[in-house]
Amino acid sequence: MSPTPPTTATTSAPGPGPGPRPGSGSGADSVIDVTDLHRRYGPAGPEGFDAVRGVSFSVGRGEVFALLGTNGAGKTSTVELLEGLAAPTAGRIRVLGHDPHRERAKVRPRIGVMLQAGGFPSDLTVAETARLWAGLTSGPRPVDEALALVGLLGRRTVRIKQLSGGERRRLDLALAVLGRPEVLFLDEPTTGLDPEGRRDTWELVEELHAEGTTVVLTTHYLEEAESLADRLAIMHRGRIAASGTPAEVIAAHPARISFDLPEGWFPGDLPPLAPLGVTDHSVDGRHVLLRTHRLQETLTGLLDWARAEALALGRLDARSASLEEAFLSIAGELNGHEAR
Amino acid sequence: MSTGKNPGPAVTRTAVTRTAGSRLAALGRAELTLLLRNRVALFTVLFMPLLMVFAMQSAVSGMDLEGSGLTASGVLMNGLLGMVLLFVVYSNLVSTYVARREELVLKRLRTGEASDLEVLVGTALPGIAVALVQSALMLAGGVAVLDLPVPANVPVLLAGLLMGVAMMTAMAAASTVFTRTAESAQLSTLPLILVSFLGSGLFVPLGMLPDTVADVLGLLPFTPVMEIVGAGLAGAPAADLLRPSLVGLVWTGLAVLAVRRWFRWEPRH
């Protein structure tokens, strides 16, 4: 098990360590600053549960920032604190320069929120719900414009209870963008959507991004984070295990090669690994796992050796570095065993 | 999908700033729509108080009111106003708050610009409005049809009704703490309704009871509301209003504190 420092979120850019700082995002000014955030549910002692355990990050103006993680990693607990729905157990949050919980009145008119599960009265129609929300929102778009954005204009007279799960998700998104927010929080915006709906949502997020909206989204779809996010953080068990641009996160988690040595061969029989570009290796019986930043070079060296020795490597598997690899290896390492 | 990069006249972005008033109106309007679409709630709100009064009619007619200065219709009118507050505001609102909480509506509303207080008050507005309109109609009907005397002191009557509305709204929000579903509100609202029914002078005027008993019952939450309403109907010296006003404020304050301390905005996990 690799030990994880309490706050490891500040891997991006040239910023110094934790603590208040001007921001690490692409823009000079950061829109969201989170320092050593903790959130605990329930009482002190073993009956309570620490959902967020020391998270720090910042999001620059106009950035799309993705929080990734397995179920229970603490993504929603973190985002709800950013939205100001609850006060953190400890730590400091600034959204647009204000405490989002204590200074809600200052922050709310400038943010848009899409919760993980939409809460709409089931007996209202789509248009009535949007009108209600417009009545609660400063500077709203026209209701029909917001519904058109998510393709729900044709469903405006339908009751919420008759909508499909995907349609409810899209209505939720329409309400989140109704006030033309500067900062948009999307908690699993595409969960439950069909592939087309997911692509539509991505397009809308990209358009808002292009118009300068700052977006914080949680997801467990890695391709979603990879295609949308300027920067991302992978959460695991209430902490940020890795963060940076997708390229940085991928680079920090090298490609891997795994294979079984045949009967009678042992890992000590392998050629010297370092000259092949291997940065790290592990052995389990005759199963060997190599990590490398130079996949082609390492693989060529390995296969040349195997051919020279006339060996058949069993279950040979080579994977280039990807967000999925990074994600799985983080989840695996922190769980105390190697990823599959 | 398009965010409308060519929004025609680029002035659509007028800075409409929402005030507390406009937010309450939006919440109240949506909630009224929901009330009109919920048959059970609508029935409770419109007919329950009247049904209860019909049920109590024979009992009250059989009372020995001689020498108390009261009339059977006067007692019934008093009870009717109490019933309106208990059913249309209190009971109805517990169901509504719990239903909105369980549907995650309250949580969603809390992500917007409305404050917590606005969310709770806005949700309560239709019930409160119906209760006040009902009270006014019944008072007018009582005078016109039942030959009841015109209320002796309308400002005091109004103050009593408003205190009742405020207390019942706060009590309703507090009662959601021990109410899991909208259906179980039928049960969880019974204690306050029964205690008020029996001990707060709705149909049994406290003046007919021994003084010590009446003094103790005067400490119940709903008794001061009925005392002030009764004083508004029949007239009473201002000094008699001090104690009920204090008791009523204390109970309302306790309910508000309970809401601040224990109110849950989302279902228990």
Image (cartoon, coloured by chain):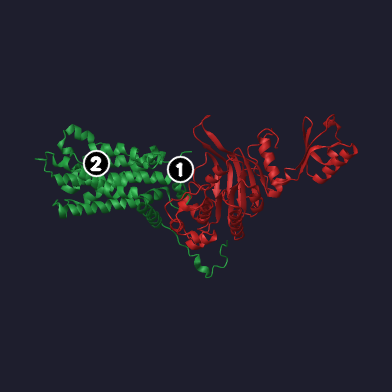
**Residue B17, percent from left and from top:** 45, 60
The structure residue drawn at horizontal position 36% and vertical position 40%, both measured from the top left corner, is B185
- Image quadrant where one finds the C terminus of chain A: top right
Left or right: residue A127 compared with residue A252: left
**Residue B35, percent from left and from top:** 36, 52
Q: Residues within 10 Å of mark 2 (few under 14, many from 20)?
A: many
Q: Colour of chain A?
A: red
**Residue B107, percent from left and from top:** 46, 46
Seen from the viewer's position, the closer of residues A158 and B46 is: A158
Q: Indicate which label's residue lies in the foreground, 2 or 1.
A: 1
Q: Secondary structure at mark 1?
A: loop
What amino acid is labelled 2 in the image?
Answer: Pro
**Residue B12, percent from left and from top:** 50, 66
Left or right: residue A210 compared with residue B112: right
Figure check: A97 above or below B255: below
**Which chain corresponds to the colour green?**
B
Chain under numbered label 2: B
- How many numbered marks does the figure carry? 2
Q: Which residue is mark 2?
A: B224
**Mark 2 or mark 1, earlier in chain:** 2
Q: Secondary structure at mark 2?
A: helix
Q: Are marks 2 and 1 in contact (CB under 8 Å)?
A: no
Q: Which residue is mark 1?
A: B266
What amino acid is labelled 1 in the image?
Answer: Glu
Let me know if residue A273 appears in the view. Answer: yes
